[in-house]
């Protein structure tokens, strides 16, 4: 099997975009307060964890996701890869794989639909943006 083209800079930019969106998504500006309420999170819980580890490992996990998305997008003929096709593949993977996986887990964990929508649509939009970067950066 031939491995598709990997634009390392696009993968890194897509990962950074996904990570930055998460920082905004889970901040008080967007869904941070609702998300904290839904998981029963208290502000004092932040001091009990090493946030550098949390941020670093989440960035690494996102790097793997965006690399895999690059694999899917760039497995097609180069002339069929574009900003729009990248958005399509990213949002598709975000919805049908990430969001549905989160949903299955939340069913067994008895989590709320609100939490599922917050976490799930973060992945749909985030991977859509990462896909746009991967598809558009030629």
Image (cartoon, rainbow, N blue to C red):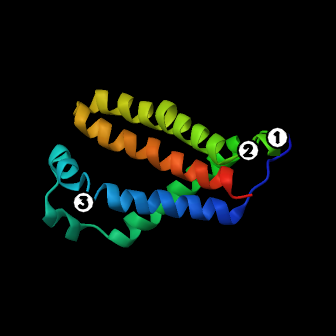
Q: Residue at 39% x, 46% y: name it.
A: 122
Which mark is on residue 77?
A: 1
Residue 32, given in percent of the width and then of the height, sits at 23, 55
Place of residue 3 in the rendered image (x, y in percent of width and height, measured from the top left): 81, 47
Rounded to the nearest angstrom, the CA distance separating label 2 from label 3 is 34 Å
The residue pinned by badge 3 equals 29
Crowding around mark 1 (Cα neighbors within 10 Å: few <14, some 14 to 19, many 20+) is: few
In the picture of the structure, the residue carrying the numbered disc 2 is: 81
Q: Secondary structure at mark 1?
A: loop
**Quadrant including the N terminus:** top right
Q: Position of residue 104 (x, y in %)?
A: 38, 28
Closer to the chain start, of discs 2 and 3, is: 3
- The residue lying at 36 percent from left, 31 percent from top is 103
* Dot 2 and dot 1 residues touching (CB under 8 Å): yes
Q: Nearer the viewer, residue 133 or 68?
A: 133
Q: Which residue is at 65% across, 61% downward? A: 10
- Secondary structure at numbered mark 2: loop
């Amino acid at each position: 099997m031939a491995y598709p083209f990997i634009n390392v800079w696009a993968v890194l930019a897509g990962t950074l975009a996904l990570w930055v969106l998460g920082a905004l998504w889970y901040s008080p500006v967007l869904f941070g307060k609702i998300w904290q309420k839904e998981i029963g999170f208290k502000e004092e819980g932040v001091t009990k964890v090493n946030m550098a580890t949390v941020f670093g490992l989440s960035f690494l996990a996102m790097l793997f996701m965006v690399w895999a998305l690059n694999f899917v997008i760039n497995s097609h003929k180069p002339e069929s890869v574009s900003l729009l096709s990248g958005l399509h593949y990213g949002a598709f993977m975000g919805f049908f794989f990430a969001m549905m996986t989160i949903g299955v887990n939340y069913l067994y964990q008895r989590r709320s639909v609100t939490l599922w929508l917050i976490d799930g649509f973060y992945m749909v939009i985030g991977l859509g943006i990462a896909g746009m970067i991967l598809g558009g950066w030629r």
